[in-house]
Image (cartoon, grey):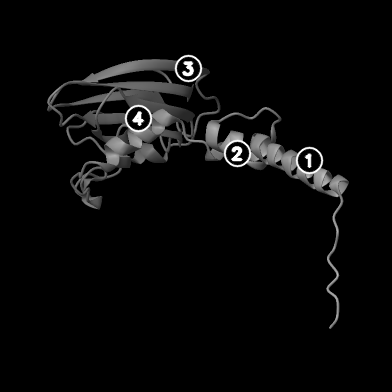
Amino acid sequence: MSEINHQIVNKKQIIKAVIFALLLSVLILVSAVLPAEYGMDPIGTGKLFGFSKLYVPGDADDGLATITGKTFPLIKMEKAGSGPEVERPIEANNPAPEKQYAEREDTVEVIVPAGKGIEYKIYMLKYGKMKYEWTTNKGIVYFDFHGEVKQAKETNDVYFESYTLAYSNNMVGTFYAPYEGKHGWFFRNNEKTAITVTIKLKGQYSI
């Protein structure tokens, strides 16, 4: 009967393996887990490798919960922009100006009464750029993010294009004006109490 040779591992090897495992665990914790799970990036690896983008603050989770807990009416494509009977003004094809508005930043609060709608718009030149962020203090609003072409003559049938229609309590994005005119949001509040929408703007526009 042949003998079975057992490999003997000395204490130094065991200690080295344990220390290596601990160091590796700490490295993974600091470089990946902290940026992705807690928004902490002490050595910069979260930003370098993109782990920080995985972090979602606790208040964001709360906001998502309020959205998914309700059912909203389906929005049809026909709701986007003017009807087919309103022609697109020729002014929409005007060339962009040589100089845009100077950069600025603003924060405004729009109170949307219960059961009613309200608009907030800014003025932008063609191809002007703007970053925006808006949030509600509570509840969900229906919104139509749209723009109206600046026309040489006033008309009763105002032409407008809708960029986004949805129900939400928060929206963030970058916008390039397709033509000169007024651009902004129509908010409708279907709740029984007023909702405050806080809008943050940064870019080339005029109020």
Query: Which quarter of the figure has residue 183?
Result: top left
* Other-residue count near label 2 (Cα within 10 Å), few / some / many at <14 / 14–19 / ≥20: some
Q: Secondary structure at mark 1?
A: helix
Q: Amino acid at mark 4?
A: His
Residue 206 placed where, x, y %?
41, 19
Report the disc number at residue 77: none
The residue mark sitting in front, 1 or 4, is 1
Nearest to N terminus: mark 1 or mark 3: 1
Label 1, label 2: how far apart the Cα atoms are: 20 Å
Report the disc number at residue 33: 2
Nearest to N terminus: mark 2 or mark 4: 2
Residue 19 placed where, x, y %?
78, 40
At 83% from the left and 73% from the top, the residue drawn is 4
Label 2, label 3: how far apart the Cα atoms are: 35 Å
Nearest to N terminus: mark 1 or mark 2: 1
Report the disc number at residue 183: 4
Label 1, label 3: how far apart the Cα atoms are: 52 Å
* Other-residue count near label 1 (Cα within 10 Å), few / some / many at <14 / 14–19 / ≥20: few
At 19% from the left and 36% from the top, the residue drawn is 157
The residue mark sitting in front, 2 or 4, is 2
Nearest to N terminus: mark 3 or mark 4: 3
In the visual, does 22 lie left or right of 119?
A: right
Quadrant where the image shows the C terminus: top left
Label 2, label 4: how far apart the Cα atoms are: 41 Å
Query: Which quarter of the figure has residue 106?
Result: top left
State the residue position of label 1: 19
Residue 54 placed where, x, y %?
53, 40
Q: Amino acid at mark 3?
A: Glu
Q: Secondary structure at mark 2?
A: helix
State the residue position of label 3: 105
Label 3, label 4: how far apart the Cα atoms are: 16 Å
The residue mark sitting in front, 2 or 3, is 2
